[in-house]
Image (spheres, rainbow, N blue to C red):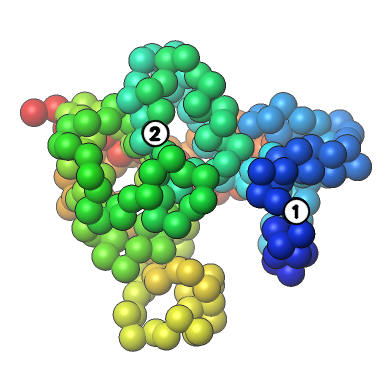
Amino acid sequence: MGFIKNIFKSIVPEKCHLRVRYIYSLFYLGKKYACPCCGGEFRKFIGFSEEQPDAICPRCGSFERHRLLWLYLKEKTDFFRAPLKVLDIAPLRFLQGKYRACPNLDYLSADLSSSWAMLRVDLTKTPFPANHFDCIICYHVLEHIPDDRKAMNEICRILKPGGWGILQTPVDIKRERTFEDPAVPAAEREKVFGHPDHVRIYGRDYFKRLEEAGFIVTPDNYAAMLGDTLIQKHGLLKDEKICVCRKPNK
C-alpha cells in the first residue's frame, strides 16, 4: 500500500491529487459503505493492513479515525454551528477544505512539515498568544513529538479558558504506562513503536499526562454508542474513544 502511494505521489502533481482520487473512487461505487466526510457511497473501502481491511475512503482518503472525528464534531459538538476560532494541527487535506468552507469557523491549520497546512509551526513553541483558540484539533500528532509534554502544555496555553480540544492518539489500553525510549534509532522505530515516525506507544497513563498539562479529560466511547450497523457502514473502529479535553474556566 505504501509503495503504491509513493508512486502516486511521485507521478501526479500535488494540486491534482484530489481530482484523481475522485476519478479513482468511481471504480468503488456501491451501497455497502458510506463516508460521512465526503458523502460518497462505495461497495468497499480500501484496505490498509490485515487488521484494517476497510480503512480508507477511496474518494477523500479519510481513515476510520477521520470519519469518527467528523461524526463526533457533527453530532456531539457545536463545531459546525457556533462561531469558533479553530486551530487544526496536521490537517487532513480534504477535511481542511471542508472546514475552511464553514462560515461559522475562523479556521487555521498548522504543521511542522505538511505542504498544505496554512502555517508552519512547531507545536512545542507556537507563535500564538495565550487563551487564543476556542477549539483545537490535534489528531494523531503527539505520538510523533519527542517532547510531548511540552506540546500538551503549549496546546493548553493557547486554548481559551472553557475552550475544548480533541487530542487523539493511538493508545494501547493493555499498557498501564507509556513506553518510550529516546535511544531507539530512527531506523528501528517501526519495529519498536509500530510506525517509522512514532517515538512512543501510549498506555492508559496518556490521559493522566493530559491532566498534568492542565486539561479536564473526558474519553468518550462515542463509536460504540453508534451501534454495529453504523460502525460497519462508515468503516469505524468500535473501540476507539474520542479524547475530549477542556481547559478549565478561570
Which amino acid type corresponds to the residue marked 1 in the rendered image?
Val
Residue 108: assigned label: 2
| Quadrant of the image occupied by residue 35 | top right
Q: In which quadrant will I find the C terminus? A: top left
The x, y position of residue 34, in whole percent, is: 75, 32
Q: In which quadrant will I find the N terminus? A: bottom right
| Quadrant of the image occupied by residue 26 | top right
| Quadrant of the image occupied by residue 78 | top left
Question: Can residue 150 be seen by looking at this rendering?
Answer: yes
Residue 227 horizontal side relative to residue 118, left or right: right
Under tag 1, what secondary structure? Answer: loop
At a point 35% along the width and 21% down the height, the residue shown is 84
> Vertically, is 181 above or below 147?
below
> Vertically, is 91 above or below 151?
above
At a point 50% along the width and 26% down the height, the residue shown is 100
Residue 12: assigned label: 1
Which amino acid type corresponds to the residue marked 2 in the rendered image?
Leu
How busy is the neighbourhood of tag 2: few (under 14 within 10 Å), some, or many (20 plus)? some
